[in-house]
Amino acid sequence: MKKYADVLKGSKLFANVSEDEILAMLACLDAKERHYKEGEYVFRQGETVDSVSVLAEGALLVQADDYWGNRSIITSVSPGELFGQAYLAGEAIMNDVAAAKDSTVVFFDAKRVLTTCSSACPFHNQVIRNLFFALSETNLRLVTKLGHIQKRTTREKLMSYLSLMAKKAGSNSFTIPFNRQELADFLSVDRSAMSAELCRMRDEGLLRFNKSSFTLM
Amino acid sequence: MKKYADVLKGSKLFANVSEDEILAMLACLDAKERHYKEGEYVFRQGETVDSVSVLAEGALLVQADDYWGNRSIITSVSPGELFGQAYLAGEAIMNDVAAAKDSTVVFFDAKRVLTTCSSACPFHNQVIRNLFFALSETNLRLVTKLGHIQKRTTREKLMSYLSLMAKKAGSNSFTIPFNRQELADFLSVDRSAMSAELCRMRDEGLLRFNKSSFTLM
DNA sequence: TAAAGTCTGTTGTATTTACAACGAAAGTGA
DNA sequence: TCACTTTCGTTGTAAATACAACAGACTTTA
């Protein structure tokens, strides 16, 4: 377990907790380590989750199959990231989580994480806050994305996204962290159609852009 | 404050906590009550949030304005519901929260909620878990909805949603909690187009339905 | 430096969707 | 029971989108 301490240190769950303190807390939080071969399932649809899970090494894929057998990838998980947090409220999980490479996962007992023990773990409260903030951040990311994708037209999606980026930058000029294909995937539209729409908006004087740099007018 | 105790009791934040215990905790959690006239703002874009907020009475609207001035409603908040949780990680809020009617909001100091005090509040741990589960549930709802809306075509959105409902019901026959207009709004598509698509899917033998009852084939 | 690969804009076509409008059926209330 | 409302399916048309294919600019790499 000790050898994953630096991965755990980089994890949001242990932000502001030193490596020594992490090691001291592992027992307190009933940490369990488990290895998965590529292709093996970490969680399967219908199971329930009662542990806080962190990927220590490898890579995971969260997948969903629909009734007619079409598989789609929901998201990927990288080392240090938490996963399955949304199911801690007790709902059965609706997706499969599978190892994309040989992977190691560290599980913490959720009840123990959320309940402060006597006084043995001075940093327990910090971990609770961290977990909460991590969930809070995920939440924010989801709400934000949903806000963009809910729009009906490509133009509206672009306006929603670009407006937000301008707000975040505090300026009408800003750079986005996506290339065209990535932006299209993020907004869930076709790249070429989006590219065309961007140019139309440019021609109408709504904005200017150069590669990933945009200016709203 | 006492007069809102039954609303708070019905809130997810205080699930499994008795009314007496709630009253005892109000001071511990540094609860503050504030009234808003219709149209007044509870939060404004750019502010930061450091309190857990529960609507005690009235109704709130979460709104967003884009760069070009188009306003859109993100969600509404009913009495007993938590709001603004996604911003507790410290990010500036990107939306306005306004009172749709005269409203009363109860704020709890987030730091106090997330940090257990000595021993004065035996139910503090329960509240922390409640808050966490509330956030977790919101998260799940968002991921699920995003999964549906991300699909490109109306048919795929319907298949994604209906598949999930069948899984949840544990049967290929189930009833959905929406009428057609509500389902269309939820999936972010046009009602009549969706209605037509449903009938096409029925004619192709993919499913059967009667009002809100569906059977997948 | 040449070649291969990537990113972006552009275009035409087929498909899908939004929108508006309407009628039938079911439900509601006086 | 009768008017009124709501819900749902249906249709035609205009608009938007996906898809495929390609060319030019730029980057990477051998």
Image (tube, coloured by chain):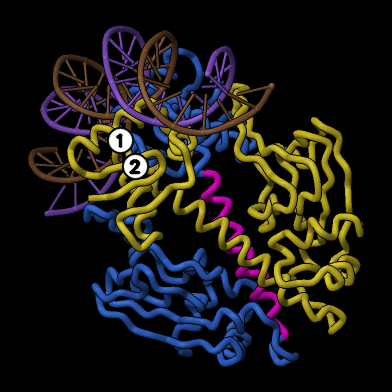
Chain colours: A blue, B yellow, C brown, D purple
The residue under the point 34% across, 48% down is B160
CA–CA distance in space, label 2 to label 1: 8 Å
Which secondary structure, mark 2?
helix
Q: Is B191 displayed left or right of A128 in the figure?
A: left
The chain letter under disc 1 is B
Residue B33, horizontal then vertical, whole percent:
88, 52
Badge 2: few (under 14), some or many (20 or more) residues near its Cα, within 10 Å?
A: many
The chain letter under disc 2 is B
Nearest to viewer (mark 2 / mark 1): 1
* Mark identifier at residue B198: 1
Residue A125, horizontal then vertical, whole percent:
71, 77
Residue at the spot of label 2 = B158
Residue B198, horizontal then vertical, whole percent:
30, 35
Dominant secondary-structure state across the stretch colored magenta: helix
Nearer to me, B29 or B172: B172
The residue under the point 73% across, 40% down is B60
> Is A128 within the magenta?
yes
Which secondary structure, mark 1?
helix
The residue under the point 33% across, 66% down is A96
The kind of residue on which mark 2 rests is Leu
Read off the magenta span.
Answer: A122-144
- Label pair 2/1, CB-CB below 8 angstroms: yes
Nearer to me, A194 or B117: B117
Using the rendered view, name the quadrant where residue A102 is placed: bottom left
